[in-house]
Every structure is written in C-alpha cells, then in structure tokens.
C-alpha cells in the first residue's frame, strides 16, 4: 500500500478533532499543499532507507511526504496532542509499521535519538528556529544535510555571507557547522492559517567543524559579543571578553591578524576562531 499525503480538508478535520487552534507561539501554521511538502523532501535529497529526523511534524503533512520516499522518520513534537495522534495518522495513510518514531518532547531538550539520523527536515517557528538548528547540529553529529522551512528573515540571515546587510551571529554560528544556501521560497497560501510573513527554504551540508568543542564555545561567546551592538569596532565590542579594555582587545585582535577597527559584520566564522585561539594563547 503506497503512502498517501494529507489534503487541506483532512488537515482541518484533524485539527478540529484534536481541538487544536493553531498558535503563533508554537509556530503552528500547518502546510496543506502536497506539492510543497514533496518539494521540501526533494530538495533535501531524501532516499529510501535513510533515517530522517523531523522537528515539529504538527499534523503530519511533511512527515508523510518524507515517509513516501521509503525513508524512516524520527519526529520530535512539543505538542502532546499532535505527538500522540501522529502514529495513527501515519498508519491510516499506509506508513509501514516501524518506519515512524515519535518523540514527545521540546526539541531544545532532546539529547538522544534512536539510531543515527543523517538528514534533518523541519518547519520551524520564528522564535526557536536558530536555537533548534544549532542544538541539533551540535548534539547529533550524524546529521549530514537537511532542508528547513523558516520565516524569510531567519532564512536570509542563516545563509548570509560576511559583509551583507543581514549577516549576524546566527550566520557566523551556522557556518561553524557547514555551508548554507537559500533553496527556494514558499507561498503563504500553502499554510493554514495563512501567515502574515513570507517563508523560505534553507538547505545545508555539514562540513568538519572549524575547531574543537572548547574552541567553539569560546568562538560563539566572541561572536555574541561582536554582534551585541552592530556596527561597533571590534576593539570596543570585544573589550569585555578580550581582557577588559579596548587596548587589551586590540592586542589580541592584532595577534589574530584582525584589524581592531574591523566590525563583526565583516568577519567569517574562521576569523572569529582565530580571535578565540589568540585569546586562549594569551591566557596561557
């Protein structure tokens, strides 16, 4: 029996049956268009027998599209009602037993997954999209690639290169784990209810981390300080984390080969790492 997808009428019927009123807090704008979920799965390159982790499956529209390929899915869902119902929905749509596992938990608190997922696919709400992505890349090193649907503002920032208008801390932190690209736009009309913001698809491929875990922690601390006040010279922005004064920060920055008058918006993740290494060397 082939796996079938949810239609718009069934999405609304499931929501009504579960007494689910879509909430902005949980980012519950459910996808009701089959072409859109299949597009996401195609862009992620999901193949049969791969293990995919999906964050925020909701009522199961994207989940079924992933399972349609013959892949296995571990779905992480924070809404208890949705997590409890998803296996029954999958079974009713022809999903083989054992192909879907559901974890009823906040994605930011998940530290263990069954098996080793290699692909991440998700429809993420604005307020947790970047923290969830960084948490999963940090915690589950088997994830090699993925595609996520996020608000346009978030997606553009994740994929932004240094020097661009929207480049920021999320851009630099994401680059620690791999390469990111805008993979497509998503019409507001494919969601129910229709949101008042645009969404995009962002794809990524993991590369080797730029440094050790200790270096990552220090680098991310430096990135946060650099972007706390945008368009501020690094010798000022990093004074608190590089010795306590602009003069001491300048010494560390020059040792790292970074101009003290540069701004965080100009630096790559690798350059932030150079500052972290110079900081660690100065402390020894």
Image (cartoon, helix red, strand yellow):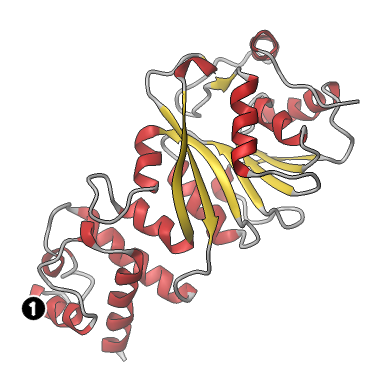
Residue 191 percent location from the top left of the image: 52, 18
Q: Is residue 184 above or below residue 21?
A: below
Say left or right for 194 vs 9.
left
Q: Residue at x 36, y 53 (%)?
A: 171
Residue 59 percent location from the top left of the image: 66, 24
Residue furthest toward the bottom?
284
* Numbered label tally: 1
Residue 123 percent location from the top left of the image: 55, 34
Q: Residue at x 54, y 48 (%)?
A: 108
Q: Which residue is mark 1?
A: 247
Q: Residue at x 41, y 59 (%)?
A: 175
Q: Quadrant of residue 55?
A: top right
Q: Look at the numbered disc 1 and give the secondary structure of its residue.
A: helix
Residue 197 percent location from the top left of the image: 37, 23
Most foreground residue, 163 or 212: 163
Q: Quadrant of the N terminus?
A: top right
Say left or right for 160 vs 41.
left
Q: Is residue 104 above or below residue 217?
A: above
Q: Residue at x 31, y 64 (%)?
A: 268
Q: Quadrant of residue 80?
A: top right
Q: Quadrant of the C terminus?
A: bottom left
Most foreground residue, 4 or 251: 4
Say left or right for 276 vs 29.
left
Most foreground residue, 164 or 280: 164
Q: Residues within 10 Å of mark 1 (few under 14, many from 20)?
A: some
Q: Is residue 151 above or below residue 140?
A: above
Q: Is residue 77 above or below residue 48?
A: above
């Amino acid at each position: 029996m082939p796996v079938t997808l949810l239609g718009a009428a069934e999405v609304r019927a499931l929501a009504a049956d579960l007494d689910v009123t879509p909430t902005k807090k949980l980012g519950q704008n459910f996808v009701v268009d089959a072409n859109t979920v299949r597009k996401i799965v195609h862009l992620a390159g999901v193949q049969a027998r791969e293990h995919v982790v999906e964050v925020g499956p909701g009522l199961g529209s994207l989940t079924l599209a992933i399972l349609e390929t013959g892949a296995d899915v571990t779905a992480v869902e924070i809404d208890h009602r949705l997590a409890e119902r998803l296996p029954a929905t999958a079974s009713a749509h022809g999903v083989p037993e054992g192909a879907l596992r559901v974890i009823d938990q906040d994605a930011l608190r998940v530290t263990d997954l069954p098996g080793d997922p290699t692909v991440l696919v998700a429809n993420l709400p604005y307020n947790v999209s970047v923290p969830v992505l960084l948490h999963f890349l940090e915690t589950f090193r088997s994830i090699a690639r993925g595609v996520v649907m996020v608000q346009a503002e978030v997606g553009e920032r994740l994929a932004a290169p240094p020097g661009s208008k929207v480049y920021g801390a999320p851009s630099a932190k994401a680059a620690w784990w791999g390469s990111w690209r805008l993979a497509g736009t998503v019409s507001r009309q494919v969601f129910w209810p229709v949101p008042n913001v645009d969404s995009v698809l962002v794809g990524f491929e993991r590369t080797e981390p730029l440094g050790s875990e200790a270096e990552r922690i220090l680098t991310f601390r430096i990135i946060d300080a650099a972007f706390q006040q945008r368009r501020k010279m690094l010798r000022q922005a990093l004074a608190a984390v590089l010795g306590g004064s602009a003069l001491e920060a300048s010494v560390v920055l020059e040792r790292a080969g970074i101009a003290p008058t540069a701004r965080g918006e100009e630096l790559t993740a690798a350059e932030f790492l150079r500052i972290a290494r110079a900081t660690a060397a100065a402390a020894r």
